[in-house]
Each structure stands twice: as C-alpha cells, then as structure tokens.
C-alpha cells in the first residue's frame, strides 16, 4: 500500500481495549510516530476490518508522548464502530493520523473552561491535562449510565462539574447554566467546547456576550478525512465577514467560535 503523507505507516497495535458503558469503548493504540506529532483537538481515521470502504473519524482523547500511545473513545453507532468495538488488545488497526487542526492553546497558566457534551467530552481530556488546576471541566450527558471520564479529569487536577439531562447524576439540566455561573465567579481566559451543535452554538453565544475567546470542535460526517472528498463542508466566515465553505477534516475540526456560521 502506498505510504500516506500524514503518517509513516498505516497499521498499529492496540495495547488496551475497555468497554466504558453500554455504548462507549476506550482504545489505546501503540503509535510512537503518531503520538510524537499529535496535538489536542486532532483526530484519527480508522478503517475497520471487513467490507468497509470508508474510515471512521474519532477524536483523540489522550496523548502519551512518553509511552508513544494515543487513546480514543468512541460509541458504537453502526456496523463500522461495532467492528472496531470487537477488536482486542494485541490486535492491529489501520489508521491515518494525526489529522486535522487542533486547539490553539495559550500558556498553561491561563484559566480555561472546557465544555464537553456526550461523546464530545473525550477531546477535552488532553486540554484538562494541559491546564491542570487552571481548568474547569463542565460535562453534559443524557443520564448517569452515559457518564465517562470524570475520574480522569479530576486526576488531571481540573475541577469538574457534571450535568445530566434527567438529573440522575450531578446537576440536572444543560451545561450553559454552570458555564455562566463560572464566568460570573471567575472570568476565564478561554472557553473550549466539543459536542452537539446546539450546545456549541449556545456556548459560543455566551462567550461572545462576555467577550471571551472561544474555540469549538465540530462533529461532521467525513469520507476521506484529509480534505479530498469535500463531504464535511461547513459554513464559516473570514476576518472580513465574508461567507465561505471550509472543511471540518482539514480546516478543523477546531475553529474559532466567531468563524462558524451557526
């Protein structure tokens, strides 16, 4: 197979595989050459074994440059992710990585609020590990059975606020209320968010009102993952306010919130 410019090889060994809840799986991939280049906010593109032609894009959850590993967390939502969930430690996976444009981070001393919704919570872990005690992580889930990564956020030194739609764990309701409370108590230098579009739109609006820089990681269906197929086009605007179409896989998945046309 022809070498891809994004990585030195395509097949990597899985060093750990764990089911987190009924739908979510954690996979640790041994990939020193990729881990050395990976940045928070980037993603990997995995090709499941079998009769699959399209890869599955999955956000990077953890980067361990010392061990040379990446951790990803994904939910089983179709045949492709089901096939990925059936892999085990010792198996190999076909992967293009690291892909996309990640977060642009200030100094670690900056105060950051990190917001994750559902399967949008994993990309926030590398940021929590970067900012440590200077970070507040606000996570939103449907219910207690879908909650993930709270212990990892705390281990990074971040203060955590958990919200669930039904109130079965943490606070009942959306992440936007604690976000405004935190801003009022201690205005952050940066807000980063990943999750459903309505959540991102609301967080971006709040950040704009309080004049806080905000970066959002968008979730879109992708084909190639490298900007060739043009499937993941999204509407954005440039510095002059002119509308344009950019691509989540290549220009993102992380954008400045003010660039996105919601």
Image (tube, rainbow, N blue to C red):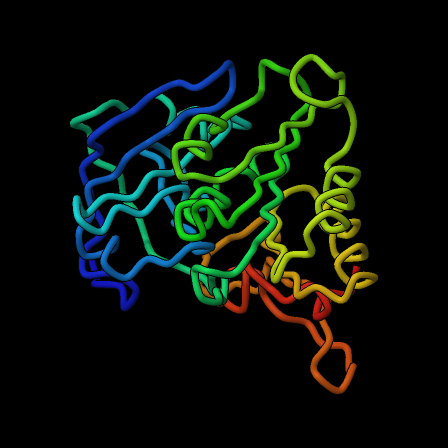
Q: Which residue is located at x 58 percent, y 20 percent?
A: 146
Q: Residue furthest front?
A: 185
Name the residue at 35% across, 36% down.
Answer: 48
Q: Is residue 122 above or below residue 111?
A: above
Work out which quarter of the rendered image holds the N terminus and state it.
Answer: bottom left
Residue 122 as seen in the image, left or right of residue 190: left
Task: Return the x and y of residue 110 as percentages of the image width and height.
Answer: 52, 61
The x and y percentages for residue 92 are 20, 35
Residue 248 at x, y percent in the picture: 57, 61
Asked which quadrant contains residue 154, the reply is top left
Residue 124, image x, y percentages: 50, 45
The correct choice, above or below, for 12 with respect to 145 in the image is below
Residue sitting nearer the eye, 242 or 139: 139
Q: Is residue 54 visible?
A: no
Q: Is residue 88 left or right of residue 152?
A: left
Res 163 visible: yes
Q: Residue at x 28, y 34 (%)?
A: 28
| Residue toward you, 177 or 29 | 177
Quadrant of the image containing the C terminus: bottom right
Residue at 50 percent across and 50 percent down: it is: 134
**Is 223 left or right of 258, judged from the image as shown?**
left
User: Residue most toward the bottom?
Assistant: 240
* 171 shown above or below 9: above
In the rendered picture of this protein, how many numbered marks are placed on residues? 0
């Amino acid at each position: 197979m022809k070498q891809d410019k994004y990585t030195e090889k395509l097949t990597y060994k899985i060093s750990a595989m764990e089911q987190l809840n009924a739908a979510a799986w954690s996979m640790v991939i041994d990939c020193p050459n990729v881990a050395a280049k990976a940045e928070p906010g980037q993603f990997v593109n995995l090709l499941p074994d079998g009769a699959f032609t399209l890869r599955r894009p999955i956000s990077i959850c953890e980067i361990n440059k010392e061990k040379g590993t990446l951790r990803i967390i994904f939910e089983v939502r179709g045949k492709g992710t089901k096939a990925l969930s059936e892999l085990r430690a010792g198996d190999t996976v076909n992967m293009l990585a690291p892909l996309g444009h990640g977060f642009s981070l200030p100094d670690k001393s900056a105060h950051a609020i990190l917001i994750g919704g559902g399967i949008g919570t994993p990309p926030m872990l590398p940021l929590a590990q970067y900012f440590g005690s200077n970070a507040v992580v606000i996570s939103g889930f449907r219910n207690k059975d879908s909650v993930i990564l709270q212990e990892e956020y705390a281990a990074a030194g971040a203060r955590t606020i958990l919200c669930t739609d039904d109130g079965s764990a943490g606070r009942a309701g959306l992440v936007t209320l604690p976000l405004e409370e935190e801003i009022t108590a201690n205005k952050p230098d940066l807000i980063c968010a990943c999750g459903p579009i309505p959540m991102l739109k609301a967080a971006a609006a709040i950040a704009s009102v309080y004049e806080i820089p905000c970066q959002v990681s968008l979730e879109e269906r992708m084909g190639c993952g490298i900007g060739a197929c043009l499937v993941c086009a999204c509407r954005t605007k440039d510095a002059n306010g002119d509308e344009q179409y950019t691509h989540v896989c290549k220009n993102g998945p992380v954008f400045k919130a003010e660039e996105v046309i919601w």
